[in-house]
């Protein structure tokens, strides 16, 4: 059972690496951004409420996000472990996740911090905006998301570093090479645990 979080600024490649790692480790990749986009696409009430935040690059309120993650982690596939992508993003979400896990007697095995210099991030995000057409890939929303990351999310790396579960990995290079780099960094910490 492997319980992981992948964090890093928008454009660092969390989504891409998150799904590749999850596939390699046989655990579900759980992306809160994808769950919100699913709700928006279906036009659910949660989607309508969330879009007011996601479109502007603001965070959806913690109470909504925490409840959504709590439910998702109770689904059967998450019993073998999980890789969370895009959650937690605030101190209150990080505490909530600790509580959710503690209730079932579990801990996070590692928090992967995917590091990419700011100049590369902006280039990647502009490129993604051209190819994927995400509603929140406007110049203003991109700028705001990077600001929110620096203010609210980046400080969480200190919390996880104090818990000694932070694994910093460079997000520069070819996609398969980065995946291998992350798997090697995890394996150096005996993650996943040998059977
Ligand atoms: P992402 O795909 O991870 O870039 O997420 C897209 C958008 O969904 C973010 O800009 C937020 O508006 C929202 N979102 C995703 N995850 C969270 C979270 N953990 N807390 C609050 N909002 C989130």
Image: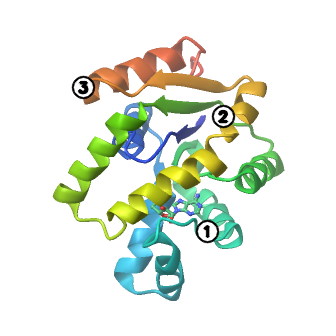
**What is the crowding at mark 2: few (fewer than 14 residues within 10 Å), some, or many (at least 20)?**
some
Dots 3, 1 in contact, CB < 8 A: no
Label 3 residue near ligand 1, CB within 8 Å: no
Q: Residue at x 47, y 29 (%)?
A: 115
The disc at residue 68 is 1
Q: Secondary structure at mark 2?
A: helix
Quick one: SS at disc 1? helix
Q: In the displayed structure, would residue 98 be above or below residue 110?
A: below
Please name whichever residue, 125 or 194, is drawn nearer the observer in this view of the structure.
125
Percent coordinates x, y for residue 27 in the rendering = 48, 41
- The percent position of residue 112, horizontal first and vertical second, equals 54, 31
Of residue 74 and residue 98, the one placed in the foreground of this image is: 98
Q: Residue at x 47, y 65 (%)?
A: 57
Q: Quadrant of residue 176?
A: top left
Label for residue 157? 2
Q: Which residue is mark 3?
A: 174
Any part of residue 20 in sight: no
Q: Which mark is residue 168?
A: none
């Amino acid at each position: 059972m492997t319980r992981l979080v992948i964090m890093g600024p928008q454009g660092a490649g969390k989504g891409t690496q998150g799904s590749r790692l999850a596939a390699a480790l046989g655990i579900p990749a759980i992306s809160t951004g994808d769950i919100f986009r699913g709700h928006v696409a279906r036009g659910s009430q949660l989607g309508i409420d969330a879009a007011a935040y996601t479109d502007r690059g603001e965070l959806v309120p913690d109470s909504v996000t925490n409840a959504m993650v709590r439910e998702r982690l109770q689904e059967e596939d998450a019993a073998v472990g999980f890789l969370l992508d895009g959650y937690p993003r605030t101190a209150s979400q990080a505490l909530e996740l600790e509580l959710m896990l503690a209730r079932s007697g579990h801990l996070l095995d590692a928090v992967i911090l995917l590091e990419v210099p700011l100049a590369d991030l902006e280039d990647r995000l502009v490129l993604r905006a051209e190819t994927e057409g995400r509603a929140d890939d406007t110049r203003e929303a991109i700028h705001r998301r990077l600001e929110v990351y620096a203010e609210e999310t980046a400080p969480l790396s200190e919390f996880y570093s104090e818990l000694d579960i932070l694994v910093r990995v460079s997000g520069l290079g070819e996609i398969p090479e980065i995946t291998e780099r992350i798997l090697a960094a995890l394996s150096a910490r005996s993650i996943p645990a040998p059977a």
